[in-house]
Amino acid sequence: MACRSDLVAKRMAGASDDLTVEQVAEELGRSGSTVRGWLAAAEFPNAFKLNRREWRIPISDVRTLLDRQRPQATSRPEAPRVQIYEDTG
């Protein structure tokens, strides 16, 4: 299995934009079974099997998955400020 720096170098050199299950798992810090679960759930709509055996996942699908999983910035109403007064009486 290639290390992260090798994958990045290959992508920058114009190598294939498709990743294996193992490469996606390594890049995202997940297990191969998690990535295969995402494939079963159609999280990578453009993924395909090479020779009816090995999955290939487009980098664009991985980016899309990451974008969907990122928490969206929401504006929260400011919490009411409460003052506590000590009873001196």
Image (cartoon, rainbow, N blue to C red):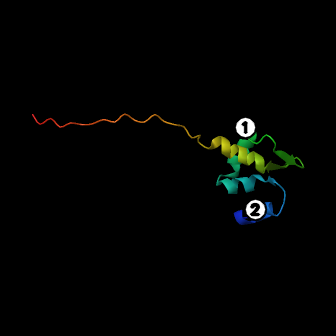
Asked if the residues shown at circle 2 and circle 1 are in contact, with their CB atoms under 8 angstroms apart, the answer is no
Q: In terms of depth relative to the viewer, which is nearer, 12 or 36?
A: 12
> Could you tell me if residue 32 is visible in this image?
yes
The mark that comes first in sequence, 2 or 1, is: 2
Q: Secondary structure at mark 1?
A: loop
Residue 9: percent from the left, percent from the top? 77, 65
Task: Identify the residue at image location x=20%, y=36%.
Answer: 85
- The amino acid pointed to by label 2 is Leu
Look at 70% across and 63% down and name the residue there: 4
- Give residue 7's quadrant in the image: bottom right
Q: Secondary structure at mark 2?
A: helix
**Gap between marks 2 and 1 measured at Cα:** 25 Å
Q: Which mark is nearer the camera, 2 or 1? A: 2
Does 71 sit above or below residue 27? above
Of all residues, the one furthest to the right in this rendering is 51
Nearer to me, 6 or 84: 84
Whether residue 1 is visible, yes or no, is no
Quadrant in which the N terminus is drawn: bottom right
Kindly indicate the quadrant of the structure image that contains residue 78: top left
Q: Residues within 10 Å of mark 1 (few under 14, many from 20)?
A: few
Residue pointed to by mark 2: 7
Q: Which residue is mark 1?
A: 41
Q: Residue 64 location, x and y as percent?
A: 72, 44
Q: Position of residue 83 (x, y in %)?
A: 27, 36
Q: Is residue 66 left or right of residue 50?
A: left
The vertical placement of 13 against 54, above or below, is below
